[in-house]
Image: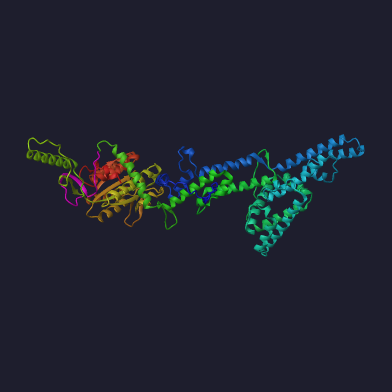
Amino acid sequence: MTRYHQPRSRYTAYDGGPDPLAPPVDIAEALDAIGEDVMAGYSPERAMREFLRRGPSTGSGQAGRRGLDDLARRIAEKRRELTQRHNLDGTLQEVRELLDHAVLSERGQLARDISMDDGDRALRELTLDNLPPSTAAAVNELSSYDWQSREARDDYERIKDLLGREMLDQRFAGMKQALENATDEDRAAVNEMLTDLNQLLSKHAAGQDTQQDFDDFMDRHGEFFPENPESVEELIDALAQRAAAAQRMMNSMTAEQRAELMSLAEQAFGSPALMQQLTELDANLQALRPGEDWRGSEQFDGEQGLGLGDGTGALQDLADLDALAEQLAQSYDGARLDDVDLDKLARQLGDEAAVDARTLQRLEQALRDSGYLKRSSDGQLKLSPKAMRQLGKALLKDVATRMSGRQGQRDLRQAGAAGELSGASREWQFGDTEPWDVTRTITNAVRRTVGEAEARWSSRARNEPESRPEFRIQVGDVEVSETEARTQAAVALLVDTSFSMAMDGRWVPMKRTALALHTLIRSRFRGDALQLIGFGRHAQVMDIEELTGLDAMWDKGTNLHHALLLANRFFRKHPTAQPVLLVVTDGEPTSHLEPDGEVYFEYPPHPLTVAYSVRELDNSGRLGAQTTFFRLGSDPGLARFVDSMARRVDGRVVAPELDDLGAAVVGSYLGSRGPAGLGDRYGDWFDA
């Protein structure tokens, strides 16, 4: 019997890269936040950056957000911890401890050795008593001392071995541990590697090396390079970064510490040959990578001493942290979150931080790929029409909520935009799109059902059992509500963009109002025409993207005259439409256009400025414009001016709170564009 074995599956831990099981990022929260910041005057690019800095919500409030700011904070904390916990004299402290122990052991041996000549003992004790206070000088002076204590001799040899391993660990991470208890053959292998390395680097600097030279070098000495570089350039990069960190460590020491270490270096492995090789290596690397930071330094204020190798590693960590801080700051031109080195971030802060950064990278990419943000011809990021529709829809829902709470308002179901309900109904005909008159339809069906039941009952024999009539609506029962043709409207929304609007916190409500009205007209009243006109020192026609992205304007001046000129020009382009003039302002007119096109400004308002504004408003009245002024603020002069202007054209004045501005403007538009009372009938117009 043949036995079949299914292949066994092998599973390993996830080791980075995009998680195939990760859910797609949710950009809804990001779009809401970006839209809110854009309304506040941020550019879309800045709004997106601010959201990425805060990070998406994790359900734990502001403290639970893990954005760029949180990562940058953790980077700064680790940097501060490194410098405040450690100092750089760890090697000197370790050498001093070994030296003190060796001297103490030697003194004990001298005291115990009764066979020693008294003169020899006295000479040796004199040597030990007069050792210089400098650790390096003491070590050098004892280099020729004939130790009587085996333990003391071993301690002194450990000093030379420690210095050699620390010097190598500065340039080659891990050497201190790898060469512990090393033999003479191990040290000879290191010397051979350094000789071959310096020859390779010198050859490379002269442009005479080949890939084969590198391959041969790695075949002989690859065990010294766990990074496994694949070219001489990669090898130089790794060595230069480490060597530069070692130099920055030396720069961070005091002059006394540097002098001590340089003097001690001569005792490394008991021979100056090692230091000569390392000095040549440093010179080669500085010549090949002058762009590395060879002159920097750090201030270490802690109590925990670091050896030369660990200190160099700490300086490398600080360099990595500084690079990550710059990447997370995103403050340079063309910055993208893809610039963040996730491997480096994982090494410094752990895998969780790298996952957070990867999520932010995917979120940024999703925002750019979603179609909500687009790059303009000048390279600036803009909200796309798709994003504007989404933002406007959200604002319009807020307006509807506010309007539904007003007294005297009532909902009325609307179906389609073919016309306004007249109150009459008629029998449905094929092709009709008007809403059903449900009451008439049900009544017709009931009457027909009852009539049919009576006819059947009268035709049956008296002894037949009576059955309950079956109620169903038939086509002939259906009646639809008649509608009147709706008049098209030409709507001019004039919004004040003067200095006072920005100064008094009215900038954002003004833009939210414009976007809500624009969304309502574009989505539910597409036959109407809308023009947005901003007026400060002068007036200009704006599209909705331009207005919502408009930065606060600090030029003084309220040129209502120019704005009314543009509005009347717009009305004349739509002679068959009902003109609707909506003016949002917080100040009297203080500037006007001169006949030569120049702007005249004066405060308090010049009588000529007021006269020009009144003349253009009269022109609007003659064109039949239904006018509403929305007065912001409580300035008495503005109130008198607006009231008198409204009376001239039989218009209205509304003084809403800032939060109700959008509802007031939209309600006024709905009330101006149809039969009397239409302003009370908004219902489903907001159900886009």
Q: Residue at x 75, y 52 (%)?
A: 274
Can I make out residue 290 in this image?
Answer: no
Q: Give the residues drawn in magenta, as a range.
A: 410-432
* Foreground of the two, 42 or 451: 451
Asked if residue 82 can be seen in this view, the reply is yes
Q: Residue 470 occupies which quadrant of the picture?
A: top left
Is 490 in front, or is 10? 10
Which residue is situated farthest in the bottom direction here? Answer: 208
**Percent coordinates x, y for residue 299 in the rendering:** 65, 43
Q: Is residue 430 magenta?
A: yes
Q: Is residue 590 left or right of residue 272?
A: left
Q: Which of these two is toward me, 531 or 12? A: 12
* Residue 673 location (% of width, % of height): 24, 47
Q: Residue furthest front?
A: 1
In the rendering, at what x and y percent does residue 283 appear? 70, 56
Q: Is residue 273 left or right of residue 43?
A: right
Name the dominant secondary structure of the magenta segment: loop
The answer to whether 375 is drawn above or below residue 345 in the figure is below
Residue 653 at what x, y percent from top left?
27, 42
- Colour scheme used in the picture? rainbow
Relative placement, left or right, of 381 versus 2 is left
Q: Residue at x 69, y 62 (%)?
A: 203
Count up the numbered dots: 0
Does residue 251 appear to the left or right of 115 in the view shown?
left
Question: Is residue 163 one of those drawn in magenta?
Answer: no
Instruction: Give the residue displayed 24% in from the left and 36% down from the top.
Output: 408
